[in-house]
Image (cartoon, rainbow, N blue to C red):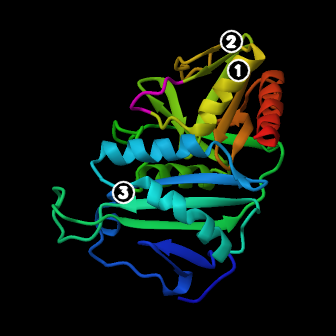
């Protein structure tokens, strides 16, 4: 494989750290055939992974949800060596972790005795102190399955939804299910009404994002009232809206389906949360 600048230099694959161009997997890996796997992404900021424990706990939980037995600690122990090989020790970067069920003859039921395939790689990525981008979003009915709480590698529904946003010249697609907003194609979504922050409850219809959890923590610290309640598609009384995610951080939404949210700028509540998020990153 020809190396390009947007690929990592090295990867961790099944316990070995090797040049990315030498990494291969079996065509019978269930991650390749079925998308039968779990992934995680976390950011290293000023030499430390932001909310590392929360990310690794979610990885463990999601692996348990699909009955993949793996000691995640074995991956954690090899992260420093991977960063060193990649020239990213102490540098701002993103780390991708993926675990599939492993290699087995193709059949739908879980195979017995398959050894999980483990993959990690990192790439340089310096996140801004505050994400000042004003996002445009479109809406679409949530056509995905009903276990969106599992951070699975089979992301075709999310990929299709994000591509829909791109074709509309937008950053994100916001999903609607039964007339209410759930989440976005690769972010969580929040709304502000009457100074109160609203976001869909962390049930099976959304991925409980780590940044989502951090924002709710910031609300508690700042004394901002929040409710884990779904907001109707008609956006009644909504003054502000914003997205959250590991690389998105906290990003204001300027308009939805071509209609401005509030005055189309970053609202005061969103701004306070962006500042609080920035301070948390500095204090970690």
The reply to whether residue 141 is in sight is yes
Task: Tell me: residue 116, above or below residue 217.
Answer: below
**SS for dot 2:** loop
Q: Where is residue 216 drawn, in percent x and y?
A: 64, 25
Quadrant of the frame with the C terminus: top right
Residue at 71% x, 52% y is 48
Question: What residue sits right under mark 2 in the picture?
Answer: 225
CA–CA distance in space, label 1 to label 2 = 7 Å
Of the numbered discs in the image, which one, if any, rests on residue 63?
none
Query: Is 203 covered by the magenta stretch?
Result: yes
* Mark earlier in primary sequence (1, 2): 1
**SS for dot 3:** strand
User: Mark 1–mark 2 contact, CB under 8 Å?
Assistant: yes
Residue at 72% x, 74% y is 87
Q: Where is residue 37 drawn, in percent x and y?
A: 36, 57
* Mark earlier in primary sequence (1, 3): 3
Magenta stretch mostly in which secondary structure?
loop
Task: Classify 10 Å Cα crowding around label 1: few (below 14), some (14-19), many (20 and above).
Answer: some
Question: What residue sits right under mark 3 in the picture?
Answer: 37
Instruction: Left or right? Give the position of 26 relative to 24.
Output: left
**Residue 250 sits in quarter:** top right
**Residue 135 sits in quarter:** top right
Of the numbered discs in the image, which one, if any, rests on residue 219?
1
Task: Classify 10 Å Cα crowding around label 3: few (below 14), some (14-19), many (20 and above).
Answer: many
Q: Which residues are magenta?
A: 200-205
Task: Tell me: residue 38, above or below residue 54.
Answer: below
């Amino acid at each position: 494989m020809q190396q390009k600048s947007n690929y990592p230099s090295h990867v961790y694959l099944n316990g070995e750290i090797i040049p990315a161009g030498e990494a291969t997997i079996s065509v019978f890996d269930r991650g390749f055939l079925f998308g039968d796997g779990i992934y995680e992404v976390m950011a290293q900021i000023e030499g430390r992974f932001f909310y590392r424990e929360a990310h690794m706990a979610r990885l463990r939980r999601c692996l348990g949800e699909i009955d993949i037995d793996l000691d995640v600690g074995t991956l954690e122990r090899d992260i420093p060596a991977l960063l060193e090989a990649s020239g990213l020790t102490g540098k701002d970067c993103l780390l991708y972790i993926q675990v599939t069920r492993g290699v087995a003859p193709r059949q739908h039921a879980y195979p017995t005795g398959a050894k999980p395939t483990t993959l990690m790689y990192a790439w340089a990525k310096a996140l801004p102190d505050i994400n000042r981008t004003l996002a445009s979003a479109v809406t679409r009915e949530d056509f995905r399955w009903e276990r969106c709480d599992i951070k699975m590698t089979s992301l075709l529904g999310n990929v299709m939804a994000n591509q829909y946003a791109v074709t509309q010249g937008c950053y994100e697609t916001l999903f609607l299910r039964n007339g209410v907003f759930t989440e976005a194609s690769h972010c969580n979504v929040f709304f502000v009404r009457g100074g109160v922050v609203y976001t869909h409850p962390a049930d099976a219809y959304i991925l409980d994002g780590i940044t989502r959890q951090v924002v709710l923590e910031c609300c508690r610290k700042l004394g901002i009232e929040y409710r884990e309640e779904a907001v109707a598609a008609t956006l009644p009384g909504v003054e502000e809206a914003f997205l959250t995610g590991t690389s998105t951080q906290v990003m204001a939404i300027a308009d939805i389906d071509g209609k401005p949210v509030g005055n189309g700028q970053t609202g005061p509540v969103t701004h306070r949360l962006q500042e609080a998020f920035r301070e948390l990153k500095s204090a970690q």
